[in-house]
Image (tube, coloured by chain):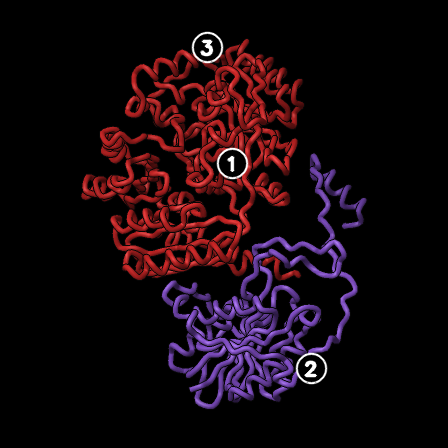
Amino acid sequence: MLSRRFLSKLLSPNGAKNFKRSLAIGSKIPELTKDRYPVRRGEFAILNKEHLQFFTDLLGTQRVVTDPAECESYNIDWIRSVRGYSTCILKPKTTEEVSKILSFCNDHRIAVCPQGGNTGLVGGSVPVFDEVVLNTALMNQIYDINDTSGVLICQAGCVLENLDTALAERGLMMPLDLGAKGSCHLGGNVSTNAGGLRLLRYGNLHGSVLGLEAVKADGQIVDLLSTLKKDNTGFHLKHLFIGSEGALGIVTKIAIQCPAKPKAVNLAFLGLNSFENILKVLTQAKRDLGEVLASCEMIDESTLEVCTDNLKLKSPISNFPFYMLIETHGSNNEHDQEKLNGFLEDVMGNGLVLDGTVTNEPSKMKNIWDLRERITEGFIQDGYVFKYDVSLPIENFYSLVPEMRQRLANDEEVVRISGYGHLGDGNVHFQVSCRQFSQNILNKIEPFVYEFTSKLRGSISAEHGIGFRKPKYVHYSKSAESIVIMKQLKEMFDPNGILNPYKVIPN
Amino acid sequence: MARVLVGVKRVIDYAVKIRVKPDKSGVVTDGVKHSMNPFDEIAVEEAVRMKEKKIASEVIAVSCGPAQSQEVLRTALAMGVDKGIHVEVSGPEYETLQPIHVSKILAKIAQNEKIDVIIVGKQAIDDDCNQTAQMTAGVLDWPQGTFASKIEKGDKDITITREVDGGLEVIKCKLPAVLSADLRLNEPRYATLPNIMKAKKKPIQKLTPKDLGVDVSPRIKIISVEDPPTRQAGQIVPDVDNLISKLKEAGHC
């Protein structure tokens, strides 16, 4: 079956199959973060020979990367928005090694940037200055998959897609799915509380992570690796490490609850002419598809163009102002199809949906999902992208886009202003792309976007986190009191502030 | 205007990982997602475009296989085909069904339906036979244009561009003719919702090989189906000298 192996590449109009998020060779290198942003280096040690000797004694020369060319990809985030200048990348394999590294760094005041697949979108996964990068890529062991309970236990550096593949053989799947699945590490997902495309159905990581193991800044290993669904003994400490972006500790192991892989998956791609109709279709989808509804995404016309024009992907239907993707997961395809077809006939019949397609063929579903999952990649070709990830009340979901189009109507630097996102979760990804970075445009967007979001009681970071880019805006979504508690916790877990400095916590 | 017949085969979807049955009698198909053979999809697209350009008067799709083959016929109907014919072949008979049988079935239907052009995919991605078009042309004694990357229909003939080693070959043949679709012939459309709904009302005629007087008794016996050998893990060498000595050791240079 020689042809089958090449088919995905040849036949898929949407190109390469196992797309990985990594820096394109020869692409433009961003300005150093320290030069572009007003940020001052902390009172951390500058790496010297003795430090490096300790690391190579611990890990050997192969797992301590110091070659400048090799270090570069660890210093730049994949959307090329920030760049650090670390000269030392560490690749531990075990929790004990992570512990020894942190203990040493804590004693010597060496700043550390924890890094997984480096697919973050807020500059959280790369150093700001010369922090030592602790990369989890070699911590990729799967310890156990329990067929009955559906609990997976693994190391933090396992790539999400590899876990999904391993689980598929046992009739299970990961509770989360995101565009970066081919590169992102589960440890990074947990540390940033990644959301993704299935959250609507399977909930967020605070629910599905049953336990974890983390290493504190002083090297202390905190074993919270419970596999229990219910465990009300004392404070629920694991939640502190979920979504704290490596500021309180480095997650090294995870126990996660995995749902059964659905026997039936159907995907519809719909074209609509207004956002009002999108809301009506969402309401009807929740009512008519109920328990089988797994994803409900929306893409506006301008966003889809980054896939069709920049990436040359093929859209199944002609152009419409708005598109929706609706996926169902169920255990019986006949039942699901009956529900979905009834729903689709209805929304076509009453004119809410103007055109669309529906399929349960894996190859076609993959090509359609590419139109959603490769948007971030497509935007990079526009030039520089100002990306925002906000939660808004559902009726205001799309309101940022027209507002910003008005605000930037006369700016010729702007290539595109558009929105797409997790409609079912009220989480919109909003972006303004320019041919290159522009301080003028940035000043017109920020803090306006945050003020606008705050006024509507939305969240200024729904799922991407705070990272380097947003600490000073946290107050738009968090009260002064809660920021004080965040600082107190940081002080307690990492008194020397060596873990992921300049990020997450406002000054 | 021409009457066009397309062959559509139901195969395991190309995005699905193939698994061999433990008893090595074949591959696992139960509960595995199937779809239309991608090259047949290209054939359907071409036929539907001929209809849209008013070159074809009617497009009929045929699928030989078990009951589920009707799913790919529905897809063909949703893409714009007018009528489906399902030739039911199931169980052990289907496992040994080969292009020799299918070509006889297609030939018979072509005669019954007064077909002018038969288009099939150049090969199916499950058995990779690449024989059906050629054999059908043989059975009917019609000219054949295989691996078509462009099809232009004239009044009494048809011009086919073929991708061959070193360039393009253009051939002209008389009608009726049998054609097979290559990858770059076109990019098949998605079936849209209104057309999927319309397709539910389009007719699918059910036949058996016996109705057509075609004998589908097996001509082969499957002895064993095996997984391809797994790729051995590579090794990292520290430098070029090491690489060369390793290659020499293994007898590669």
In the displayed structure image, the side of residue A266 where residue A461 appears, left or right: left
Q: Residue at 35% of width from left, 18% of height from top?
A: A506
Quadrant the N terminus of chain B occupies: bottom left
Mark 3 on the same chain as mark 2: no
Quadrant position of residue A320: bottom left
Q: Residue under circle 2? A: B215
Which tag is nearer the camera, tag 3 or tag 1? 3
Q: Colour of chain B?
A: purple
> Which amino acid type is shown beneath numbered disc 2?
Asp
Quadrant location of residue A459? top left
Task: Say what amino acid the circle numbered 3 marks.
Answer: Met
Residue behind mark 3: A492
The colour applied to the residues of chain A in this rendering is red
Chain identifier of the residue bearing label 1 in the image: A
Q: Secondary structure at mark 2?
A: loop
Q: Which chain hosts label 3?
A: A
Mark sitting earlier along the chain (3/1) = 1
Picture residue at 51% right of the left edge, 68% below the top: B41
